[in-house]
Amino acid sequence: MNLCIDASNIRLGGGVTHLVELLNAADPNKHGINNVIVWGGKNTLAKLPERSWLNKINPDVLNRGLLHRILWQRFSLSRLARDASCDVLFVPGGSYAGNFWPIVTMSQNLLPFEWAELRRYGCSFNTLKYFLLRYTQSSSFQNSDGVIFLTEYAKHSVQDVTGYLSSETVVIPHGLNFRFQINPKVQHPIANYSDSNPFSLLYVSIIDQYKHQWHVVEAVHKLRQSGLPIILNFVGPAYPPSLNRLQSAINQYDPEKCWVKYYGSVPYEFLHDIYAQADLGIFASSCENMPIILLETMAAGLPVACSNRGPMPEVLGNAGLYFDPENPATLSKTILDFINSPLLRNEKAYSSFARSQQYSWSRCADQTFAFFSSIANKKRTKF
């Protein structure tokens, strides 16, 4: 059996991480898959593992702009898949315009399907982009033989827009790299901290409209006013308008730049070192498909103050404390509850660390390749 993967639009961030980790952990032969062919840009393919069963192909057009990649998928991909005797085509980017079947698509971005979140971008290029993705992905999911969702929440949210999908659907969460597993540290009373040895809060995420970093700054400012020796660190790339909003909040609440630090983007391979230096993790997003950063924070042995929106309660369960990401007062209270109780921090840190262990890339790869095999075999039986 031959599996083909369209990675033409997998170029940055979580999509690349998923494909790299999936293929690193995969055992295709276990599911009757002898060969895996991946078409993608040269930078993406360079990050994929070297395997005897993996054939990485880089058509030059896939190193060019978005329009070139769209036209390649529309007019060349299906022919290439047939020439490769492909038994199932996987499109992890979610949008597909070809005429080859069977295909399996994947929902990795929930922004196009949550109108209230999409509206945060106002009249902008991002709004147009996500609106077009809403259309193309809805059509792709409706015409797929199989669709992979990352959480139950995402599955229901997408189908609220697309309507019931007649294709076969499955929920397969992403995994977590073992590098992020750090045993919870000993929890100390806040009296053990000082301005020279502050209690460190960490929020790792892109600075974006639905991530609410400015509300986090305001919430921590309220606690600082009471004399608590706490600092706040942000790590991640930035959407420029949102970065401006964050910088405005920092200028307002920490004009001397004493306790808020923004470190920008940190390479994925070094992120675990960032988590290891923190005392408490914050995750304030209001829109997620599968919150990998939340998983990383859990695995790093940190107590977690978490947004109560989206799939976050599905992932974290009772292993953290929740707040409204658009209400700084609720975050202030949540952080204060943690700060005042080393026992609570210890309990939640160990609970979230244990819960994170169920998310492995080997499990994800096994379930994903089993699904590919099932879709291919059903198509064969049908004809």
Image (cartoon, grey):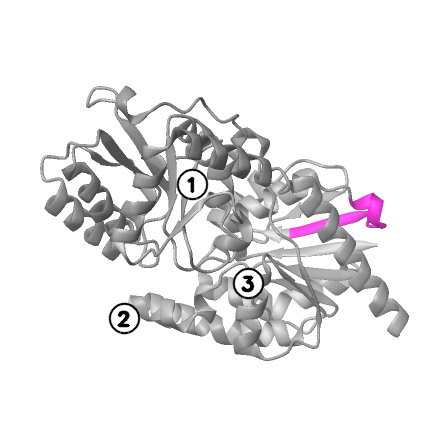
Q: Which residue in the rendered view is the most extreme toward the bottom?
A: 163
Nearer the camera: disc 2 or disc 1? 1
Query: Is the C terminus in the top left, top right, bottom left or bottom right quadrant?
Result: bottom right
Callout 3 environment at 10 Å: few (<14), some (14 to 19), or many (20+)? some
Q: Which mark is residue 122?
A: 2
Q: Quadrant of residue 170?
A: bottom right
Question: Residue type at mark 2?
Answer: Gly
Upstream in sequence: badge 1 or badge 3: 3
Question: Residue type at mark 3?
Answer: Tyr
Q: Position of residue 76 (x, y in %)?
A: 63, 66
Q: Which mark is residue 116?
A: none
Q: Is residue 359 left or right of residue 329?
A: right
Residue under label 3: 153
| Residue at image location 82% in from the left, 50% down from the top | 33
Nearer the camera: disc 1 or disc 3? 1
Which residue range is magenta in the image?
Answer: 28-38
- Residue 33 located within the stretch drawn in magenta: yes
Q: CA distance from mark 1 to mark 3?
A: 20 Å
| Residue at image location 19% in from the left, 23% down from the top | 195
Q: Is residue 190 left or right of residue 383?
A: left
Q: Which mark is residue 304?
A: 1
Question: Residue type at mark 1?
Answer: Val
Callout 2 environment at 10 Å: few (<14), some (14 to 19), or many (20+)? few
Upstream in sequence: badge 2 or badge 1: 2
Nearer the camera: disc 2 or disc 3? 3
